[in-house]
Image (spheres, helix red, strand yellow):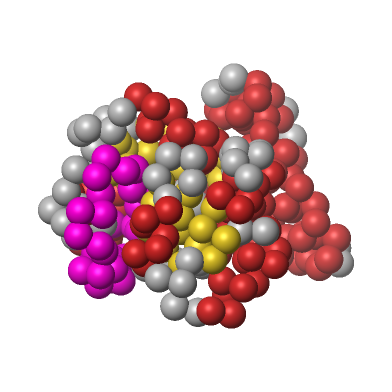
């Protein structure tokens, strides 16, 4: 298990590699990458000291854990090229959004499948990942998967695979909603006379700090909101404006719409 191979070397694969190397889960040379872009493989090798596999067969043969970090539409083609009997009890981790574990189990005999949904803040070491373990994954393999994804953020496990579609709609798409909110906060400050650079810095730090308070205080977000909202004060006026604009209902609708679209795209 302790040699990890990445099929596909995009941004999320790099975020995972950075987290694993930083957490010293294994020596960097024990991480292998295979990608259709030789230049990209050389770049990751230079930056993180990882090994390069010239072929899919070479990577699968050397690694006990194989991460499918390709685009969802590429997965069937990769599976067709997999070496026969390539599974043989190995741990396969898929971060391909919407691709169900059954797609892998139908091709990779005797393999152990983990489906994961990390998000883009993993690139800053602050990811959120949903995990689903298909039948047959051993306790040791589960613990190893947890360690991998915990190296660049938090992990939540689900006993139902369909809930990963909700993870996609929440934490997968959620950063885009947060970016919009940060941009809107800054635009409001600019409208009120503040320079854009300062407004963006303060808006981003405000959202980051508020999120940390939710995680570390153990308090409900509503309670924390009430702590900031003095009767008749500035925050109360701002919250009232958000409520007039159906802020909470619109955010809930966004998550629900993303979830519906994810179900449509799932294979």
Question: Quarter holding the C terminus?
Answer: bottom left
Residue 152 lies within the magenta run: no
Identify the residue at the far left of this view.
106
The structure residue drawn at horizontal position 37% and vertical position 39%, both measured from the top left corner, is: 131
- Percent across and percent down for residue 14 are 58, 59
- Percent across and percent down for residue 189 are 77, 59
Question: Quarter holding the N terminus?
Answer: top left
When the figure is inspected, residue 236 is found, relative to residue 69, above or below; the finding is: above
- Percent across and percent down for residue 2 are 49, 40
Q: Quadrant of residue 192?
A: bottom right
Number of numbered discs on residues: 0
Query: In screen coordinates, is 232 left or right of 193?
Result: left
- Percent across and percent down for residue 74 are 30, 71
Query: In screen coordinates, is 149 left or right of 135?
Result: right
The structure residue drawn at horizontal position 28% and vertical position 33%, both measured from the top left corner, is: 137
In front of the other: 191 or 183: 183
In front of the other: 204 or 227: 204
Q: Is residue 100 visible?
A: no
The structure residue drawn at horizontal position 13% and vertical position 53%, both measured from the top left corner, is: 106
Query: In screen coordinates, is 155 left or right of 193?
Result: left
Identify the residue at the far top of this view.
218
Q: Is residue 2 visible?
A: yes
> Which residues, given as a range, are shown in magenta?
72-98
């Amino acid at each position: 298990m302790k040699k990890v191979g990445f099929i596909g070397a995009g941004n999320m694969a790099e975020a995972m590699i950075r987290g694993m190397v930083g957490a010293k889960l294994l020596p960097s040379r024990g991480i292998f990458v295979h990608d259709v872009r030789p230049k990209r493989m050389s770049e990751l090798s230079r930056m993180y000291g990882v090994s390069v596999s010239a072929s899919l067969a070479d990577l699968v043969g050397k690694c006990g854990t194989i991460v499918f970090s390709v685009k969802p539409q590429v997965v069937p083609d990769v599976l067709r090229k997999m070496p026969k009997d390539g599974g043989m009890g190995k741990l396969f981790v898929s971060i391909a959004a919407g691709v169900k574990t059954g797609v892998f189990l139908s091709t990779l005999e005797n393999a152990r499948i983990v489906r994961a949904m990390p998000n883009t803040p993993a690139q800053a070491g602050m990811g959120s990942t949903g995990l689903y373990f298909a039948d047959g994954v051993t306790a040791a393999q589960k613990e190893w998967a947890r360690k991998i994804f915990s190296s660049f953020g938090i992990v939540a496990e689900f006993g139902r695979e369909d809930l990963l579609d909700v993870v996609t709609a929440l934490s997968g798409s959620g950063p885009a909603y947060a970016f919009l909110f940060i941009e809107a906060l800054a635009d409001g400050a600019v409208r009120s006379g503040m320079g854009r650079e300062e407004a963006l810095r303060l808006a981003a730090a405000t959202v980051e700090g508020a999120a940390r308070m939710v995680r570390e205080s153990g308090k409900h977000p509503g309670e924390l909101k009430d702590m900031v909202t003095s009767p008749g004060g500035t925050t109360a006026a701002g919250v009232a404006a958000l409520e007039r604009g159906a802020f909470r209902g619109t955010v809930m609708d966004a998550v629900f719409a993303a979830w519906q679209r994810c179900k449509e795209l799932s294979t």
